[in-house]
Image: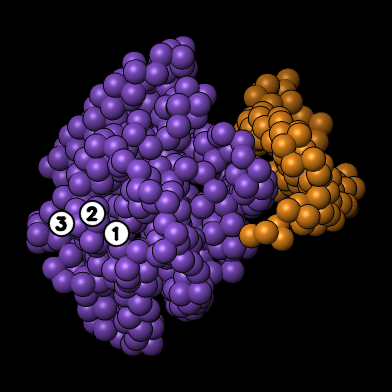
Chain colours: A purple, B orange
């Protein structure tokens, strides 16, 4: 019963918030409490799953391959918890950052609509149902990215809507082909049939269509151009929410599908995805190096970091997958952290452009710290979580004998450090430019939200041992799909 | 029937891609609509076409072997509804884009990026 709550609660919150749209103070307090409740619930679910193993719920009492199944394994629970924590932080941040017009125009209900879609995608065990959750999430994000309606935002959202729709089209086509071959939509049942049936033609074509759909969503190498063209346009709180949740849903789905459905031609998929991962890392980080807008630098880094996650996944030893999951969690926190810190810079100095910024370390050292910690974590400086994430990924890569991709990963780490140091030098370290406008006040709520996130990043680094233990268990579940199949279908 | 549908799907996909590559954003929305139609038909064909049989109703001899599968139709119905929602949003977005910027040409605006 607890399994429907991550979907039902955001729905109820959204409905409540839609009807009280004009009462700003109520909206702010209510969404804060609501997102706290969601975080608490997800943490509870995580504890429950790590104690009892995979939890399933057959909706409407229809047995597994016929009805829609909700499945929460450790990976889903970890993603749920991190997502709702990121949402909580953004909910604390928003009242002090987003202008009143946007806040009363339906910002809060839309965030919960987005969360409903994201949570649904994390816990569903049915591919068509997953498509529906993707659409729920995308529709909310369409409105969020266009909310406010400035010319720049509208241009960004036309691109975003188009590319997202095309990705969904690939997704549905793949579902149609898969259903035509296997006659089932249940993910566990599909995986079971792919392992037990002699022959299942067209599976690789369906998987390739899935790959295109998810790599558009996750912004992998040939399909990433929409992300830096649209993510920097809305207020940075929305961008932070997208960076922490939306793109990671693509990665989650890729992990799930790779573990369940890549049965034939494993070598082809491994090499193909490793090449994609390497190119994603390299191209993202190189394009970031040429930018001067904080939001654009960070947007390109989203792309680069996604490459690491795919690399860990495709090596597919429990060690590497555990590192990839840890890295994903770290990235959701640190990435959101750097975006929020970028927002603080904007609130103080009125610009995102590095050329017009400077001297922030001297005038506000605390604000500088709030950027420094997550940025150095992204760059992989010990003892922050980014370092451990990369360390375990590299260890996993060497242990599995994939030396080339591991070398690329290490080199890309250096370039990431370069970009982060560039923001640091330009915005915080160099002396203030001549004609800088008078600094404005930074709201306490946004500072509090950023501090909370920085604290979470530090704790993730300090408690790397216990966290890695959980991600390792999640990786064991993921690398042995029979556990998942058995939990859903109840047979060998 | 199958061949006819295959050709139709191909034509729809072709026109959709052509329209998507136009600079005019209204044509872009038309392209999205065509893309949705083509995919709905693809779902219909790919998940197995049985013509002339009802779904779930046994024939006189009590056989169930030759009934058509109702699930693809349910999937397509869902996809149509979702497509409708996205199209409606895209149309409003395009209208806003036009009233804010005064142009329907995407490229005219991207110069100042």
Image quarter in which the N terminus of chain B is found = top right
Q: Secondary structure at mark 2?
A: loop
Q: What mark, if any, has residue B61 been given in the picture? A: none
Residue placed under numbered mark 3 in the picture: A458
Figure check: A31 above or below A251: above
Disc 1 designates what residue?
Answer: A360
The answer to whether residue A358 shows anywhere in this view is yes
What's the chain of the residue with tag 3? A
Inter-mark Cα distance, 3 to 2 = 21 Å
Query: In this figure, what is the number of numbered marks?
Result: 3
Q: Residue at x 15, y 60 (%)?
A: A461
Q: Which mark is residue A364?
A: 2
Distance between the Cα atoms at labels 1 and 3? Answer: 22 Å
Mark 1 vs mark 2, CA separation in Å: 6 Å
Closer to the chain start, of discs 1 and 3, is: 1
Judging from the image, mark 2 belongs to the subunit labelled A
């Amino acid at each position: 019963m607890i399994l429907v709550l991550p979907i039902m609660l955001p729905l109820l919150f959204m409905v409540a918030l839609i009807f009280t749209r004009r009462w700003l103070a109520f909206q702010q307090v209510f969404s804060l409490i609501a997102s706290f409740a969601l975080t608490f619930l997800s943490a509870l679910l995580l504890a429950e799953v790590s104690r009892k193993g995979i939890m399933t719920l057959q909706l409407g009492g229809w047995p597994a391959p016929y009805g829609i199944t909700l499945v929460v394994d450790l990976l889903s629970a970890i993603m749920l918890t991190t997502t709702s924590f990121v949402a909580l932080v953004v909910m604390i941040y928003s009242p002090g950052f987003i202008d009143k017009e946007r806040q009363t125009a339906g910002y809060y209900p839309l965030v919960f609509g987005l969360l409903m879609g994201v949570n649904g995608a994390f816990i569903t065990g049915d591919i068509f149902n997953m498509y529906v959750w993707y659409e729920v999430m995308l529709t909310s994000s369409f409105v969020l990215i266009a909310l406010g309606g400035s010319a720049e935002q509208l241009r960004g959202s036309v691109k975003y809507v188009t590319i997202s729709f095309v990705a969904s089209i690939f997704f549905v086509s793949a579902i149609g082909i898969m259903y035509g071959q296997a006659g089932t939509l249940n993910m566990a049942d599909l995986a079971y049939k792919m392992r037990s049936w002699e022959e299942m033609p067209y599976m690789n074509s369906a998987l390739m269509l899935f790959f295109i759909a998810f790599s558009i969503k996750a912004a992998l190498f040939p399909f990433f151009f929409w992300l830096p063209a649209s993510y920097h346009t809305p207020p940075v709180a929305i961008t932070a929410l997208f960076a922490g949740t939306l793109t990671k849903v693509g990665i989650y789905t890729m992990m799930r599908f790779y573990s369940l459905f890549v049965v034939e031609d494993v070598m082809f998929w491994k090499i193909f995805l490793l090449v994609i991962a390497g190119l994603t890392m390299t191209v993202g980080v190189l394009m970031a190096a040429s930018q001067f807008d904080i939001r654009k630098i960070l947007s390109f880094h989203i792309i680069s970091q996604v490459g690491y996650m795919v690399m860990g996944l495709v090596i597919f030893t429990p060690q590497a997958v555990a590192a990839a999951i840890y890295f994903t969690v770290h990235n959701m926190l640190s990435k959101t952290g750097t975006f929020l810190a970028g927002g603080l810079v904007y609130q103080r100095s009125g610009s995102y452009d590095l050329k017009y910024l400077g001297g922030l370390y001297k005038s506000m050292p605390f604000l500088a710290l709030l950027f420094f910690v997550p940025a150095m974590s992204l760059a992989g400086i010990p003892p922050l979580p980014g370092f451990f994430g990369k360390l375990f990924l590299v260890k996993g890569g060497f242990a599995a004998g994939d030396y080339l991709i591991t070398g690329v990963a290490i080199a890309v780490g250096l370039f990431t450090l370069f970009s982060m140091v560039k923001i640091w030098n330009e915005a915080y370290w160099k002396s203030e430019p001549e004609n800088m406008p008078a600094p404005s006040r930074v709201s306490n709520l946004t500072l509090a939200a950023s501090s909370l996130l920085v604290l979470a990043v530090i704790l993730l680094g300090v408690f790397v041992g216990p966290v890695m233990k959980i991600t390792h268990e999640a990786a064991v579940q993921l690398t042995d799909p029979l556990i998942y199949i058995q939990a859903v279908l109840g047979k060998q | 029937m199958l061949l006819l549908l295959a050709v139709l799907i191909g034509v729809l996909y072709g026109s959709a891609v052509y329209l998507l590559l136009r600079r005019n954003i209204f044509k872009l929305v038309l392209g999205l609509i065509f893309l949705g139609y083509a995919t709905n038909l693809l779902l219909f064909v790919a998940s197995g076409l049985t013509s002339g049989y009802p779904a779930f109703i046994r024939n006189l001899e009590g056989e169930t072997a030759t009934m058509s599968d109702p699930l693809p139709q349910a999937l397509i119905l869902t996809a149509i509804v979702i497509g409708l929602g996205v199209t409606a949003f895209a149309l409003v977005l395009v209208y806003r884009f036009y009233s804010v910027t005064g142009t329907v040409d995407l490229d005219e605006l991207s110069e100042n990026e």
